Amino acid sequence: MEPPARRRRVLLTGATGYVGGRLGPALLEAGATLRVLVRTPAKLARAPWADRVEVAPGSLDGDLAGAFADVDVAVYLVHSIGQGPAWAALESAHARAFAAAAVAAGVSRIVYLGGLGRDGDDLSVHLASRHEVGRILSASGVPTVELRAGVVIGSGSASFEMLRYLVEVLPVMVTPRWVTTRCQPIAISDVRDLLVRAVMDERVAPGIYEVGGPDVLSYAEMMQRYARAAGLSRRRLIAVPALSPRLSSHWVGLVTPVPVPLARELVESLINEVVVAADATPTDELLGRGALGLDDALSRALATTRAGGAPTSFTDADYTVFSALSTDPDWAGGTVLSDVRESAVAAGAAATFAAICSLGGNVGWFAGDWLWRLRGLVDSLVGGPGLRRGRPATLRVGDPLDFWRVEELSHPTRLVLRAEMRLPGVAYLIFEITPTGEHTCRLLQRATFAPRGLWGRAYWYAVAPFHRFVFPGLAAGLARAAASLERQGAE
């Protein structure tokens, strides 16, 4: 009698990202024993499948030996698109570190999701980097399955959100020449299932597989198909050939939730035709079924979006607009500027924490809301996220909150928000609660800013007068809201 087959041990990177968050539970369902490499384990904790995986805290910049130990298949879903001026070099460095660790651990297979595009074409930086990562992984000698996909359609994907906002917000659009380029969109559910098969089925031989749905069409045609799926009138597109990708990305950043640096890379990639080659292995054959057409993919994504149930979103990934510059001299920074407000609250810690966690979105920020909206508009105009992201129903670590992101959440004593707006420095908004009695506490509210260069200092002192309207009112509003919640709880 043969011994039972050993379950395939899989290492998944990018588990808290858009695709990885869909792939993780699917691999578990397929019978994999799953380990995930995550920089911030608290972000994974919000996933309903988190208790079924082994968590390896760390990143591709550190020691990977422990994460790769006793692994059969390693899945590479790491992306650094738009993260600073040298993001493509960072992607290559991460790929080399990953490949070296896979070789050292004796991994039997690497699975990687890359991007479509002809190698002989003048590819965008985004697509060229995707192909380079694939070459680095394959050159390691570890058998590598590289799936190359184009526009991914699914609730929460950057491509879908960009398409959705453009079509829904603008009935008349001035369009650049890239809207006539052909593409071959694919549903996120098909991408997920293709990755599962590449990981779990040894019959999928190492190599490059170009994958796409059955529809080949221009981006302009895709816009019209979205309008039809969403029940909107036909959109009027006015072609302006002189509109450059850089200008287009600012336009996309203003109208959609996609930040300008990310939008720029996506738009530049749309200049390249991303269509599966005629001699490629048919996607239907790889899937073992027919791939979803664009209309079905759009309908599914719309239904999930409208129900508010997108399991993952492109905003789940950390997005830092500015990163520290090695050329920034010590004398230009190093100091943390702050605005500190402390107040006594006639409510317990739980009610006060609940009031703090209600901030943002439709609730607003209790004082100077027009100033917050103005700051959000300015941020959108210069390429930041602005206030368009809103807030989730319940805050968790890693969630976007207007132009902040939840950095730390310790119920019921501490909430830390990191600013993702365009800033010449790094900003945090910190709330700390100290109980002083059964129904009283002290609230410490701190806004901190580590300026970058002289411009950073100038920025802080320029906006400091507005802080006098915003931050005292915010602290007072939180105290009132907490007291109200405390009274409601007592009734």
Image (tube, rainbow, N blue to C red):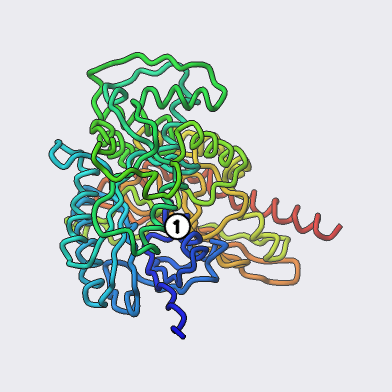
Q: Is residue 419 visible?
A: no
Q: Is residue 304 visible?
A: yes
Q: Amino acid at mark 1?
A: Leu
Residue found 58% across the figure and 49% down from its top: 392
Horizontal relation, residue 45 to residue 138: left or right: right
Residue found 75% across the figure and 55% down from its top: 485
Report how many numbered discs are placed on residues in the image: 1
Residue 230 percent coordinates (x, y)? 55, 27
Horizontal relation, residue 462 to residue 91: left or right: right
Residue found 27% across the figure and 57% down from its top: 333
Residue 269 percent coordinates (x, y)? 26, 36
Above or below for 90 versus 474: below
Residue found 47% across the figure and 47% down from its top: 189
Horizontal relation, residue 120 to residue 443: left or right: left
Q: Quadrant of residue 196 in the image?
A: bottom left
Residue 220 percent coordinates (x, y)? 37, 23
Horizontal relation, residue 417 to residue 10: left or right: right
Q: Residue furthest right?
A: 491
Tell me the crowding category of disc 1: few under 14, some 14 to 19, or many 20 or more residues within 10 angstroms, Cα based: many
Residue 370 percent coordinates (x, y)? 54, 34
Q: Quadrant of residue 138 in the image?
A: bottom left
Q: Name the one closer to the observer, 412 or 475.
A: 412
Above or below for 357 versus 213: below
The C terminus, quarter of image: bottom right
Please, what secondary structure does the residue beneath circle 1 have?
A: helix
Q: Which residue is mark 1?
A: 23
Above or below for 408 versus 385: below
Q: Name the one closer to the observer, 393 or 457.
A: 393
